[in-house]
Image (cartoon, coloured by chain):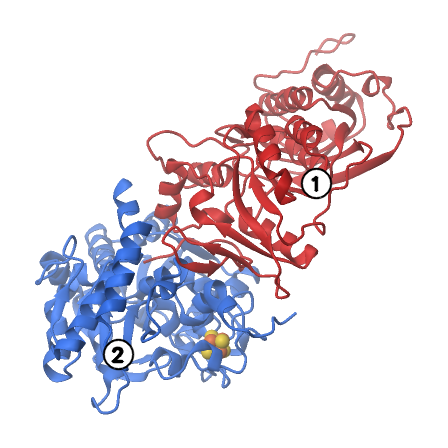
Chain colours: A blue, B red
Amino acid sequence: MKYIEEFRDPALAKTLARAIAAEVAPGRSYRFMEFCGGHTHAIARYGVEDLLPPAVEMIHGPGCPVCVLPVGRVDVAVALATQHDVILCTYADLMRVPGSKFDSLMKAKARGADIRMIYSVMDALRIAEENPGRQVVFFAIGFETTTPPTALALKQATAKGLRNFSVHCNHVLTPAAMRAILGDGEKVPLDGFVGPAHVSTVIGTQPYEEFTRDYAKPVVIAGFEPLDVMQAVLQLVRQVNDGRAEVENEYSRAVTPEGNTRAIALMDEVFDLRDSFEWRGLGEVPHSALKIADAYADFDAEKRFSVKTEPARENKACECGAILRGEKTPEDCGIFGDPCTPENPLGACMVSSEGACAAHWTYGRFREKKAVPA
Amino acid sequence: MSRTGRRALDLSRGQIDMSHGAGGRAMAQLIEELFFGAFDNPALNREHDAALLARPEGRIVMSTDSFVVSPLFFPGGDIGKLAVCGTVNDLAMGGGVPKYLTAGFILEEGFPLADLQRIVESMAKTAQEAGVAIVSGDTKVVEKGHGDGIYINTAGVGLVPEGIEIGGERARPGDVVLISGPVGDHGVAIMSKRENLSFGSEIESDCQPLADLVAAMLAAVPETRVLRDPTRGGLGATMNEIAQQSGVGIELDEAAIPLRREVKSACELLGLDPLYVANEGKLIAICPEDKAAALLSAMQAHPRGRDAAAIGRVLEDDRRFVRMVTGLGGTRMVDWMAGEQLPRIC
Ligand code: SF4
């Protein structure tokens, strides 16, 4: 793994930091959103903010799969696991996400529900094969990165006739969320985007053209290493200074303009676009998520199981929405740190280490002169 | 079985059954053949429930710990070695020279005697290496399904030499933080075994008794203020405990923290932060700045501290924050970890 160190080299970081500071125009400020939680995490984990001049502000976007899953969907996951005698498989990140009334999959598991944390959807398929007498549901979340493996699992389940396997699909789409953040294009306090790394390896660079064309926002796609982020910031500053809005690809070691065409074809075959989907923080966003296509309807957990949930209740004090839109920072939330902490997350942004609140609490809060809650 | 004699324990195919905990002949045989043979020492062999020991001079340290681990055998150790090292190291971190241990076993019905023998022998070997005697023990058997094969509890007593004052509340601004070797080996060894991951060469647990290293350190620098073994929760949790207890801040230098390449790669792959991964054979020491060079060379001169390094310093900070200058040159907090470390998905 030698290559990784090259993207964390302190000497290179200093050079880049100097270059960014030199490019920043006096008297102007730059607000860039890193869409992805992976970037949010890298920025916080490596202290990248310390290497950026004060004029550059990073806004943490909604690209954290568990952060944007609405409360109602968490409730459905809990209900699936508790009301039907299924084995519910999901990624570990989701376990602690609070649903209504502070319930979570972790708590449901403690109450006896059969919930398995898995690393890959293939584990869920295996569990289904090993437990022919049980219904196994994969609760699928994530952006375009985790979608192709889910599609593959659905195809394999069909090929094997694995009748006890199904998928509860909550896959969402990056460009639709970026569109929602930009809204009607008026008065959005953003000067550009650091574009996703892994997502772009799947969808390519082309889907971002609309943001440069229709919204005049530069997009620089960047890898998840801290130097990638700094390089992207430098390119964004240059674009802003030049009055340009282009899609640039800093992550050309992995991202091509057309993306992974096989993965895209696979997704097109297995999934259909939903008319609308609710995002935590962004509300209903048109054409922003996928559902299982009719040809695979037999494996759709939404069709196979009916679950009863009460109307979802979002924590009113939580400012995740405004934070995901870049309008507020975690410190603006009245319950940040007290009582909302990663041990006791009251909102979604506090759950995953990729969430804006968790990243700031875990890595960045020493910067503020706030009193530590006991 | 013959009417008169009794058959020796079948150590290759035999299993624990309820009679091994019932207080009858089977239990006596198990204790005699398996435990006494391995833990041979005068205090134990009195065959009393309580060990009779001479009264020591000065202060004693005492500690107890229970051990539950899966898998029971892992690269670099097993639950038995862990159970001895755990308590020995807790005593040593109190500044004590470990003397006596007790061992309690909770065995699950059906547990293979061969595994028990391996574990007991490993405990005996480790105890000898650590210079402690296992002077009293106990076994209980639980029904199948009521345990995880074997649980072990050890408790221990050690003697604190004159003039040694070690405590988590004693760190002072300006002090230097040292570590005895690379972080994360134990946790990653266990996790890669559990997840069946391989990373080229096998990663071994660092599980080892640290009493002799501590003795060498305290002989060189009796002014040492804090000793702590960063077990569960790793370096991150240990630093926060000390900052909390001493009412200070701590700043670590990421580039100075020893970390094996394989462990680093494994952590990248699993999405774990090596700062929070458990160690079972490393210690953190904090001492006054003017003693740091002497302490570091005493550590590096010892086989168990060969890769020791100075990794940070103690600061004045009412908020008791632990922070770290990252390898990149920025600064970030090293917070308490929330819940368990869970691998990330993307
Ligand atoms: S601190 Fe907690 S409640 Fe406040 S915005 Fe963040 S996640 Fe929501």
CA gap between label 2 and label 1 equals: 61 Å
Judged from the image, the secondary structure of the residue bearing numbered disc 2 is: loop
Residue beneath the point at 22% across and 76% down:
A192
Work out whether residue A267 or residue B40 is closer to the camera in this orientation and state it.
B40
Instruction: Say left or right for A168 vs B193.
Output: left
Work out whether residue B218 or residue A137 is closer to the camera in this orientation and state it.
B218
Query: Looking at this rendering, what residue extends furthest in the right direction?
Result: B55
Judged from the image, the secondary structure of the residue bearing numbered disc 1 is: strand
- Please state which amino acid type lies under the numbered disc 1: Asp
Above or below — where is A181 with respect to A104? below
Residue beneath the point at 89% across and 24% down:
B52
- Please state which amino acid type lies under the numbered disc 2: Pro
Residue B224 picture location, percent across and down: 69, 39
Q: Where residue B65 is drawn, which disc sits there?
A: 1
Residue beneath the point at 51% across and 73% down:
A368
**Residue A351 visible, this angle:** no
Q: Where residue B100 is drawn, which disc sits there?
A: none
Above or below — where is B271 with respect to B257? below
Q: Residues within 10 Å of mark 2 (few under 14, many from 20)?
A: few
Q: Which quadrant holds the N terminus of chain B?
A: top right
Instruction: Say left or right for B120 vs A370.
Output: right
Question: In the picture, residue A223 is in which quadrant?
Answer: bottom left
Q: Which residue is mark 2?
A: A26
Residue B89 picture location, percent across and down: 67, 35
Residue A25 picture location, percent across and down: 23, 77
Which chain does the residue under circle 1 lie in?
A: B
Which chain does the residue under circle 2 lie in?
A: A
Q: Which quadrant holds the C terminus of chain B?
A: bottom left
Residue B286 picture location, percent across and down: 63, 44
Instruction: Say left or right for A204 vs A360.
Output: left
